[in-house]
Amino acid sequence: MLSFLSPAFVIAAAGPWALAACAFIIFAESGLLIGFFLPGDSLVFLLGMVSASMTLSDSPVSGMPLWITCLIVSVAAFTGDQAGYETGKHSGNIRRIKSWVQGKNRNRIKRAQRFFDDYGSQAIILARFVPILRTFVPFIIGMTHFNHRRFIIANLVGAVIWGVALPSMGYALGRIPLISNHVEIVCLCIVLISILPLVFKAFTSWLSRSEEIETK
């Protein structure tokens, strides 16, 4: 992981603005299409660890009540997804995106629309826990003009679960010296675990394509 994208670096470098910087990164990861490379899970987990006052004890975030951290993370995640949805919803007014949607990708958009009509709420909630997916899913759902009220409800559920679960896990595990003394390793493990669903999906897709080729 690049040093300037390291969660520990972000929190330490931001100083008194650490929580605001983390909130912006969480928002940007799903609210801006360029945010797919930003640290999300590991950053939120580390915020919980710092709140436990067992690591980065000189940080202004250290000792902050856990509920405040959870609230800010949840709000940033929720507003980020809402921004991504609205961007996708109004992207039809952008000439280049409009031609992309109405061109050879028209059928793909229609398939995506059918998928989100059937599994939209579950997909929105699960995407919140998977890097890269949580960047693009709100935008794509917005493009399909998925029901706004359903999106808000699913987005709220996913944001609150994610915004409470990860900081709470970090807070609990951060009180264990063995874990709090190896922050970088823990953050790397979180990143690897969070991308496992993508790796598994890619592997199963490759396996199915290989079987199709063999049967032909």
Image (cartoon, rainbow, N blue to C red):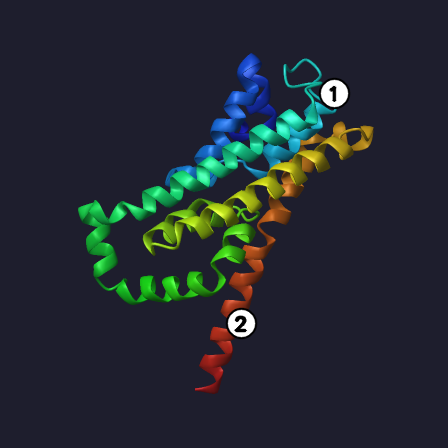
The residue pinned by badge 2 equals 207
How many marks are shown on the rendered structure? 2
Q: Earlier in the sequence, mark 2 or mark 1?
A: 1
* Among the 4 quarters of the image, the one containing residue 191: top right
Distance CA(mark 2)–CA(mark 1): 46 Å
**Residue at point 69% right, 24% down?**
50
Rendering coords of residue 148 (x, y %) = 40, 49
Rendering coords of residue 99 (x, y %) = 19, 55
Which is nearer the eye, 177 or 145?
A: 145
Q: Amino acid at mark 1?
A: Ser
Which element carries disc 1, helix, strand or loop?
loop
Rendering coords of residue 142 (x, y %) = 36, 50
Which is nearer the eye, 53 or 91?
A: 91
* Among the 4 quarters of the image, the one containing residue 171: top right
Q: As displayed, is residue 12 above or below residue 171?
A: above
Could one spot residue 1 in this view of the protein? no
Q: Amino acid at mark 2?
A: Leu
